[in-house]
Structures are given as structure tokens and as C-alpha cells.
Image (spheres, grey):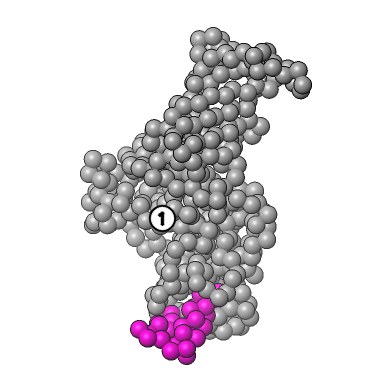
Amino acid sequence: MKYYANSILWGLLIPILCLGWSTATLAKPEPEACITLGALAYDNWTSTDGGGSGMPAGESEKDYLRCKSCHGWDRLGEFGGYVRRTRTAERPNAGLGDLNTASRFIAPGLGNFYHINRDHILHTGTGRAFEDGSGSWVPLDDNPTPENVAAHAGGFTLGNLHPDFSTTGANAGDIVLTEDQLDCLVDFINFGDADPKFYFQEIDQYKDPVEYFINSGASATAGRTFYVENCLACHGEPEDDFTGGNNGKPEGGMLAYLQGDGKYSKFVHKARWGIPDTSMTRAAIGSPNSQNMIDVMLYLQEFESSDFQLTSGISGSWYDRDRDGEGFMIDIAAEGVVAVSFYTYDTTGNQLWLIGSGHVDGNTFEIAFYSTDGAVYGDAFDPLDVNRHPWGTGTFMFDGCLIGSASIVPNEDFADMFDVLNVTLSRLTTPVSCTGG
């Protein structure tokens, strides 16, 4: 499922968060500082930089308290990078295998389909006790009995439930969030500019690992500049596989790190807001904005090799989201022949169809486009009346089943009327199956 495939879902999903509050009444931080605090608290609200004061007495495993553990770094739950994340004695998950079907999807989207509030975080009277987090884990035996299976299933679901973070509920008297943390978490999660829909044009959760398609407004050139100025000293040059000298972290270097499930979501959160209680603070990494983030992610992604091979699974309707009203019908036959119809407009506003064919070469193909005229509609149609005019070429490239690009170049006869057109392509519909060789 594409994470924003149906906008109706955004309004229906019920936000849940792994947080809590206290009755401290300090002045709320300034907006920018508050959003940063909220982002760090989302990572780990028990950390000092996240505004916390350590672990509560009722839980010894911090992942059973971190917001990201249930909701994912992208806040999409099972619909994002945590689609395959499992529960263990040390961590909950985003709902995989859980009898509780409440959604962990809490990304409002740039359209602001809903906003969360304090009550969505507190879960007053409805959440679990801290001790029911890691304490509920019951492993399956090698030869499980029915009683063991039932205990495992019950504990599995219980540990994934949202804690009660109210001052009068199951965890009253234990360490909970300050008022600042609570208010700033609300501000951060409602901050559209940090929503995954800005960073990522698509997330293909069917791929293993999950595949990320960076927002089409990104510039790899600008990303290189940002990386050199703010990241290179710790994470190294591309010729060294971005291994750097950061005490061997991330293991294997940046590119190897980004190959795992959900790692782009994790990267963009930590690279923008910092890592609590480490030297990687937001100020130390240049206080990046969202544009910096999509730029540097595209820069890094361009070093990854793609072995995607086009098949008939790519067939369907495609368009550029910024050019709604024109698009492409693409059909790939089993033998690699591809036919494309491009519906667009001429320079005076009249509808224009360009049609052509070509052959697939790996993840690309080139089309020789023709325009037609001469024939008439209805019973008077005669195929001998159709005139076919060589119009130009189209070069198409796809990195996966959900996103591609096209460059449309008119030939000399039409160059004075039509400009070269470069577009980013997204599917209008998701295929039943699409696999690259």
C-alpha cells in the first residue's frame, strides 16, 4: 500500500503515541525550539536533550517508551519503514502480528487532514501500565502448548498497547513527560514541514527493504554542498563508501546503513533534529531545513546502484503530480516491446496525442513519438487517411514500480513550437503486482 494512496484514510486514522506528561508549569519554548524539543522527545523522551530526567521505575527497556518504536520514524506505523519490524523482549513493533488493530499511523500529511492534541498523547484511563511493556513478553517454546501459545499472544498484544501517561492512571507517581515535552510533541507531530509526505514522494513497502522515492523538488547538487559543509568530517567521502571516522558508526558506512528497512525515515529524522545526548546536535549539523534533507538524501541515494529491470508490471497510467491534466499510458509486452501514448496540449491549448513505441533496455526505454491527423470521427473513418508525422523522442527511466522520469524532446520540425520537457512520473493506480528483475 502506498502510504498516502487514499486521502480519506488520513481523516479516519486515530492517533496514538507512546508518551506522557507532568504538572510542571514552565513557560513553553519558542516555536522553533519547541518543535526541535518535540522531535528529540519523539526519539527518546527520557533523554536529557529530549527534556527528560531518565527512565521511569516501571520499565527498564527504553524502546517500550519511545514514540518511534510503535509509530516508526516516519510516523506511518506498518505503512512505512516498519512494515516488517517484529516485537521482541527489548522492543514493541508497529502492529505486525498484533491482535490489537488500532492504527499506529499518525502522520497528518501536508494537507493537515487532522491534528493531534494532548488527549491523544495521554490516553488517560485507557492505556497500559509501564510494567506491561517488556514485562508482558512471553516467548514461544520450541514445542509450545496451547497455554504457551495463548500466553504469548496475550502478552504480545499487551506490550504493544499505548501506555497510560496521565497523572492519575496506571503509572501515576512514576516519571512522565513535562508540560513542555507534551506541548512540543504536539507541535512537532502537527508540523507539516517535517511530515513524511514532504520528504518522500512515494514509499514502496512491498519492496524488501522498503524503497524510498525522494521528493521531486530535491537537488543532488545542493545535497552535495550540504553534505560537504556539515556531514563529511564525520561520515567521509563517497570513494570511501561514506565510512568516515565516526567511531565506525553507522556500521558499514552511510550507504550500507541506508539499505535497511526504514533507514531513510530514521536518517531524515536524526539528520535534521539531531540525536539526543550525543555530539550530533541540531546546531552541530547546520540546523538543516526540510529542503536540505531531501537534497542530501537524493545526493546519497544517487550512489546506490539500481538493478531494477522493467517488466510488464510497469504498465499503466502515469503522470507528473505538478502537471495534473496530462499524462502517459505505458504498455510493456513480454518480449520487451513498449508502446506509449502521451496526452498533452499544443501551444494554442488544443488537445494533442503523441504515440510511439520502442524497446526496453534494463530500466529505461526510448520512444519515437508521432503526431497524427487527417482522419475523421465515426463511420467516415478511413485508416488510409491517417497522416503520421515524426514528432520527437521520449526517454523514460524507472527506479522502481512506483516512480520514474521522462525527458520529451521535439525534433527540428517542432522545436520552434515545443520546448524540451522533463517530468517526474508517478502512478495513477497501484498495480496488483510489479516486480523488477
- In the picture, which quadrant includes the C terminus? top left
* Residue at 25% in and 45% down: 241
In the rendered image, the residue lying farthest to the right is 379
Front-most of residues 155 and 62: 155
Q: Main secondary structure of the magenta part?
A: helix
Q: Picture coordinates of residue 434 (x, y %)?
A: 49, 47
Say left or right for 384 vs 83.
Answer: right
- Residue position for label 1: 208
- Up/down of 222 relative to 366, above or below: below
The residue drawn where x is 64% and y is 52% is 6
Q: Residue 141: say if magenta.
A: yes
Q: Is residue 359 magenta?
A: no
Side (left or right) of 185 relative to 236 = right
Q: Which residues are magenta?
A: 134-163
Residue 149: x, y in percent? 46, 85
Q: Is residue 26 above or below residue 298?
A: below
Q: Quadrant of the N terminus?
A: bottom right
